[in-house]
């Protein structure tokens, strides 16, 4: 009798050990780890900044915003700026200052200087902002809280080079002679689009 009871006792201990082991394993692979990997709906705030010192916000790679820029000369020495965006919507004036995926405004720079905040894809760049010489016109996408949308840790932006050559009068403006093809970041491609902008600062909307 004693010989037959020992295997039963050992079997019972073995079953308890296996059950306890399964319970411990299931506790380490539950929903908390899955939830921790989810991306925030407004993008992930990074430690890096752009040239202006504004924080970068990493967008969801599956629906990352894109931008392209095209700049063409107009009569009167001004320039027609047109943006193309994908996976991005311009926020109207009065929008709450919080980040929402795929929304925000475009900041327009000439040679690194901010000239306008655009709430639409078109803008007329005044002649006095483009003196004689070659200039870099950059569009950079921002969230509504002022952070910069980024992909792979780099700002979502696009740059076009333009050249103004002939002086046109006492105002110091120069006549446009054409624009080089846009130098597009990894997150965009230049295509003409329609619509109008409502810049918060600088110039006059097209």
Image (tube, grey):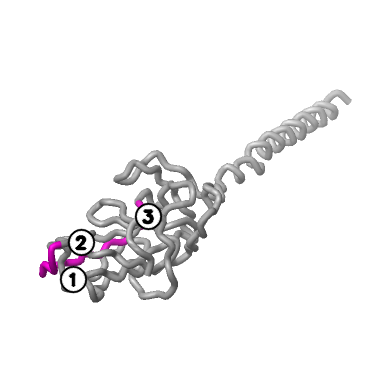
Q: Position of residue 12 (x, y in %)?
A: 80, 31
Q: Image quarter for residue 129?
A: bottom left
User: Based on the displayed image, in which of its 4 quarters is residue 131 positioned?
Assistant: bottom left
| Residue 182 placement (x, y as % from top left) | 26, 67
Residue linked to disc 1: 176
Q: Main secondary structure of the magenta part?
A: strand
Magenta highlight on residue 181? no
The answer to whether 131 appears left or right of 60 in the picture is left
At x 26%, y 73%, the residue is: 72
* Nearer-the-camera pick, 151 or 73: 73
Say whether disc 1 or disc 3 marks the residue closer to the N-terminus. 1
Whole-percent x, y for residue 58 in the image:
44, 49
The residue segment tinted magenta is 155-170
Of 96 and 188, which appears nearest the observer? 96
- The label shown at residue 130 is 2
Q: Residue furthest top?
A: 2
Residue at screen point 37% across, 70% down: 206
């Amino acid at each position: 009798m004693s010989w037959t009871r020992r295997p039963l006792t050992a079997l019972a201990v073995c079953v308890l050990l296996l059950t306890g082991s399964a319970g411990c394993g299931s506790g380490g692979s539950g929903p908390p780890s899955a939830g921790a990997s989810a991306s925030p709906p407004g993008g992930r705030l990074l430690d890096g900044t752009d040239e202006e010192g504004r924080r970068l916000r990493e967008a969801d790679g599956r629906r990352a915003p894109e931008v392209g820029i095209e700049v063409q000369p107009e009569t009167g020495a001004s320039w027609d700026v047109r943006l193309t965006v994908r996976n991005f919507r311009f926020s109207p004036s009065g929008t709450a200052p919080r980040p929402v995926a795929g929304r925000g405004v475009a900041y327009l720079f000439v040679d690194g200087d901010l000239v306008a905040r655009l709430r639409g894809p078109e803008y007329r760049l005044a002649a006095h902002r483009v003196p004689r010489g070659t200039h870099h016109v950059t569009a950079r996408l921002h969230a509504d809280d002022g952070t910069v949308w980024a992909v792979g840790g780099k700002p979502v932006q696009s740059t076009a080079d333009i050249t103004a050559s002939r002086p046109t009068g006492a105002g110091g403006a120069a006549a446009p002679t054409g624009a080089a093809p846009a130098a597009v970041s990894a997150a965009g491609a230049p295509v003409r689009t329609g619509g109008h902008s409502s810049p918060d600062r600088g110039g006059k909307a097209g």
